Image: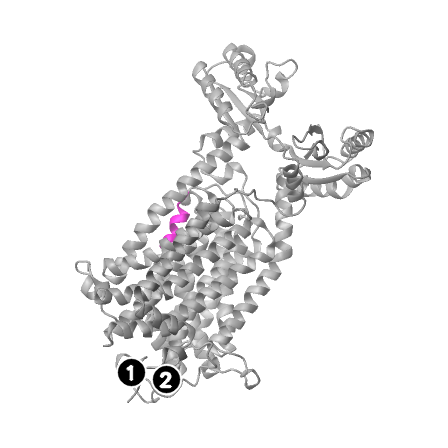
Amino acid sequence: MNQAPDPGRLPLVERVTHWSVHNRKRAGFGWLGLVILIIALGAGLGSTNRSEHSPGETGRAQRMLEEAQVFSPPQESVLIEAEAGAPGYDENPAMRKAAQDVAAALRGLGKDETGAQWASDITSPTDKGLAAKLVSENGRSAVVRFSVTGYTMEPMQKAVREQQRSHPDVAITQTGKVSVSQAIGDLKDKDFLRAEVLSIPLTIVILAVVFGSLVSAGIPVLISLVSVLAAMGALTFAGKWVAMGDSTPSVVLLIGMAVGVDYSLFYLRRAREERAAGHDNDTAILIAGRTSGKAVVISAFTVIIALAGLFFTGIETFTGMTIGTIAVVGIAMIGSVTALPAVLSWLGERVDNWKLPWLGARRTEVRDSRIWSGLVRRVVKRPLLWGGVGALSLALLALPALGMKMSDPDLKHRMPTDVPALQALDRLQTAFPSDTNTVPAEITVRGADLQGPEIKNALSELKQQVAQSEGKLHGPVGTSLVKSPVDSSRSVLVVRVPLAGDGKNAASVEALKELREEVLPASFGKVEGAQYAVSGDTAKQEDFNSALSSSTPYVFAFVIVLAFLLLTAAFRSLAIPVISILLNLLSIGSAYGVLTLVFQDGHLSSLLDFRSYGAVVSWLPLFMFVTLFGLSMDYHVFILSRVREYRGRGLSTRQAVVEGISRSAGTVTSAAVVMVAVFSVFGTLSAIDYKMVGVGLATAVLIDATVVRGILLPASLALFGDASWKLPRRLKWLPGISLEGAESPAPAAASEPTGALAREKSSPTAEGAADPLVGPRV
């Protein structure tokens, strides 16, 4: 008579499942307690909203200004436009009066609590000698310029609104980097709320259809939401030391919903399957922990390893995202192997309560997928043909990615055209084209007598070098001495040098190179004790791209090598990791191709409501690589563990592939539908970077769950045959990870039937001989 195994001798995941089932309250409330503790730590310690620094020289300039507790005041503009049919500026007293009153209102704002002027450097076309510069050629537009030196924009915005009401005969609009950034921030906040409002009900609806039960549908969503909330608390806590970018909360929501639903789905479907096979509820949960629970843990660690590769970049944009996504994946994994088994044990058959009319009875049954089963059977019969066609299709789809260009969008391309501040900026740049043709580089200088003769000589030399640069650099060269309020020795000199080009093209990059490598060493570089660094939009983009290109090989190597080692340990095979990695790279490459076609080349721009700027957001390709590499392993580990389970029962590799994929198809398809739906929500948001994230991830998951899972994976396993499950003799000493648990099923005879009958004769809980495919347990 067989005895139940001693829980103390079970592998770790099985011990955790066993403990959770027999200690429901401790497991469930323990996980919730962990979540509450994380949130409380974040709320209690608070966040200092640490500012994000760019890599390279741009980051050094930012730190110089921070250490001096000063900042380079941003420039804002108030655009004054004549009404249709009205005369131009010279013949339009209403325009001149408006310009005069706007300037007077800004000058009359006074100082903030720190003693700084709310607005400074105010220039108006009514000022002597400035009309030629501040009135457009056609006279239809005039501009009042000022620097934002106060700590908030509200007084300036209020003053401009009052002038709008006082001058109904002209159009008065404030615009500039601060105004547009503020509008973008507000819109992103609305986007984040919209993503929450749309993704959560959509996920519940899909899961309700998948399970046929509202109770079953609610559990994965609850696991996901609690994990996201806990990760947000972790971000608040980590924000004291690490900068968190604007996109980090959205990315955490995106990944948290995806992995939380995936992990819960794997567990729930397997437990339901075992209950349908005749096992009592707790036994079914233990089997789910033995199989799907371990697949969840391995999948989660693969995602975490992949995401951790981003730390190699040293780029702060990635650091916050990485911490947040690792936190949400880890919390979701812990909840899935502790709280979820406890909840399922407590609910019992009530997990299928609140069935949907017409769907409930049918959905709560466990069935193989006839569509996937039929497709996979055809693929394993002719694997070379099917695999070749599938691989060629994805390779062709990936071809456009060879021409991918990486650059961040400017302000007017970041959001849709209906943002008033963006519309005004567009009109301003049309009326004053010199604003777009002169992109200044900002040189921050400190560590010397900034008003001494050496600095003055260096400035003279710099201006002379600019004049001799053959148009790469040009005037006027602007200078401003910014005194530190805490220490006069920390004061800085900010020098603005306009660059050729539009700020992003080759002319601007060449001009920046000339400034950094030739002009500055010959001027400020000769001043003893002086430190300088170049920043600005062009410099920021170049420094980011440089840091990215130098670190990308290390990220790729780290992710691929560690994923290879993890999969080798999990499956005791060299072929499985090689197949998985190559298929991942192929699906990611095809997603890159779609991203290039849609956003860089502008296809579907009207449907998705964006304006192409001829590139892809610079941080996205690397982020997509690590994220998709990890997420796609969810499917691969889950499917391969089922295939390996059937292979361990004595079925041939081709039979095991058909059985494993047919049996896991419902779970994987359901998880993929949820992922694609949630990611697609982000494709409908306003910001172009959100759109790219949503479309890119949705495309990759769709490809991975269809072409890769249904054609390329079974074709590859059929071609490798038994070699798929072999580890060279000289590597047998490597530690392994048992996916099936301590008590593995007895191998079925090769002549036994497959399908439902085979499953009945060879239950995953049957005790007997150890699985010969499983290595040492860890």
Q: Residue at x 45, y 72 (%)?
A: 387
Q: Residue at x 59, y 65 (%)?
A: 557
Asked whether disc 2 touches disc 1, contact meaning CB atoms under 8 Å apart, the reply is yes
Residue 475 sits in which quadrant?
top right
Provide the residue designation for mark 1.
758
Q: Residue at x 37, y 53 (%)?
A: 678
Magenta range is 677-685
Residue 682 in magenta stretch? yes
Could you say where residue 433 lies in the image, as x and y percent from the top left? 59, 29
Could you say where residue 677 lies in the image, as x and y percent from the top left? 36, 54
Mark 2 vs mark 1, CA separation in Å: 10 Å
Answer left or right for 574 relative to 639. Answer: right
Asked which secondary structure carries label 1, the reply is helix
Query: Would you say residue 6 is visible in this rendering?
Result: yes
Could you say where residue 146 lies in the image, as x and y percent from the top left? 58, 23
| Magenta span main SS | helix
Tell which of 628 and 335 is nearer to you: 335
Residue 549 sits in which quadrant?
bottom right
